[in-house]
Image (spheres, grey):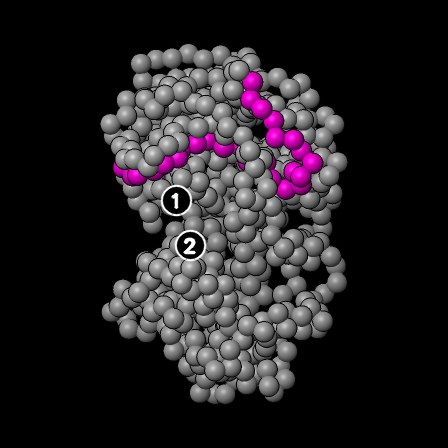
Amino acid sequence: MNREELLAHLRRHEADFDPGRQLVRIPLTATYHTALKPDRHPVVYGLLGSVDYAFHLLKLGDGPSVERAAAILRRVAARQDRDPVSATYGIWPYYDEEPLNEMDRPDWNMADFHGKLLCLILKRHGGQLPAELAALLREALGHACRAIVRRDVGPGYTNIAIMGAFVTLAGGELLADEELCDYGLARLKRLYEYTMEIGAFSEYNSPCYTTIAIRELHAVLADSESAEAHRYAQALTDLAWRATALHYHAPTAAWGGPHSRSYSTLLLPVERRFLADALQDAPSEYGETIRCPQQYRPLFAESGELLLTERTLMASETGYQAHATLYRNEALSLGSFSRGVMWNQRRNLLAYVRIPEGTVYVQLQFLMNGRDFCSAMYTGVQDRARALFGFNWLLDNGAWHSDLDKIDGRFRASDLRIRLALGGDTEALPVPRADESLVWRLPLGEATVLTVGPVWERCDEGPLRAENGRDEEGRICLDYVVYAGEERDFDFHAIREAAWLFALSLDSSGALPGVTVRETERTVAAALGSDSGGEIEIARSPGATQVLYAANRVRLPASLGGAED
């Protein structure tokens, strides 16, 4: 970040700053944890965003900027819960107008996010602040560190595992607290060993959280004094950049799938800026200088054929494995997981295709009343640009979130459907019609035809029917409707059969891949092409989440080693 970019960043926040409240106003966009609703609170006073604004004001460093930053930091520090016996000890609410006890499950991650900013502020700009405020912030940092230790997030929660390690390690150094330093180093070592045993981050290939992980690892390298921590951070940084570079698809300028967590199927501006900045050589005048290692930079321009599969879980911990597969060539990128629930942050099957007008993405969804449905379980296998996948239902999961919105297989709904959504530069594309076999075919560019259709289905709700159209975002929606009508009660515990299998291809033929299906009383299995093309087997009835994660079986194609999940 140079001076011009810093000033532009500050100007963007200037219009939203309220001098009376000493906080920044932001649109209410959070869907988790807050009980506030956008219709009644379209704009709120964001505490974390205000601290970030203060941090950048301190980078500028002139008298008025430091004075404003100090006022913000005093205001935000007062909102932390500092009572050690409290259930929310050490954390902050999201918004000034919503106390912790009024939130819908306060977010413990706020100890990590605020703690990181406080670490950087005190280490880099503590001398600019009044002594009494610096002491107040040191106290707040100590409370945040102890909240992080109390929560003790495991290494599977990648970005928070890294961030908490940094806050406790660097915070312990700053506070001269050896116990915190030891905890932070041990946590980073545990994450390193866990990740290297898998071979990938557990939060696999996440555009939003991989960039955060790289930033947090950079903070360890830049702001911790521990040589041992530096070794772990450097190795993890290398792994993160390699994964990012392999998945980036230059012809579509897209971060190829699959994504374990994503807030936007197309790259957000902040993610594009992160990659653009990291691929240049000029040093940063203000703040972090994060650069992609030279050995991985050529991959960001690569357009040749690539086929990749990786494990994503610690099977000894979960009792089952999941694989991620990526295939890319000059025209497209197709990525898929072998299993996962269909929540709104996960992209279990995702393609990006180059067309003359730009880039089109193809995203698989399972929707309940128009929202991604966590109680649908995906199981799939991919062989280059072909895929075979299926769904069944869960008895103990959530509607739009697995933990925060539990329905346990019982809910009211007016619509359930499986959707292939095409977004991006789709304006010139026609909306296709399904044929009599419910197969959709849509040419995408010169050498690619999207073809998808059911190969087997059983459901007490009756057969699928096809619907097409465009949604409010202009995306082309190719839907398989399970139910649409009057709102009514659903009880998955009373359903005898509910399972569906589909085949998909993104090649020039416009033909569905050949699939062979075999049934048993309790399961249905399907093989993609010959025996070497991969196979899945899923339960025909709804089941508990952990039961179906273990019971739904996947055998990878021979081209990917033929391993079983």
Residue type for callout 1: Trp
Q: Quadrant of the N terminus?
A: bottom right
Vertical side of 131 occupied by 119: above or below: above
Q: Residue at x 53, y 54 (%)?
A: 213
Q: Secondary structure at mark 1?
A: loop
Residue 560 point in image, percent of width and height: 56, 25
Q: Which residue is mark 1?
A: 400
Label 1, label 2: how far apart the Cα atoms are: 10 Å
Vertical side of 28 occupied by 206: above or below: above
Q: Residue at x 39, y 35 (%)?
A: 415
Q: Which residue is mark 2?
A: 31
Whether residue 141 is visible, yes or no, is yes
The mark found on residue 359 in the picture is none
Callout 2 crowding tier (Cα within 10 Å): few <14, some 14–19, many ≥20: few
Q: Residue at x 33, y 72 (%)?
A: 81
Residues rendered magenta in the picture: 409-435
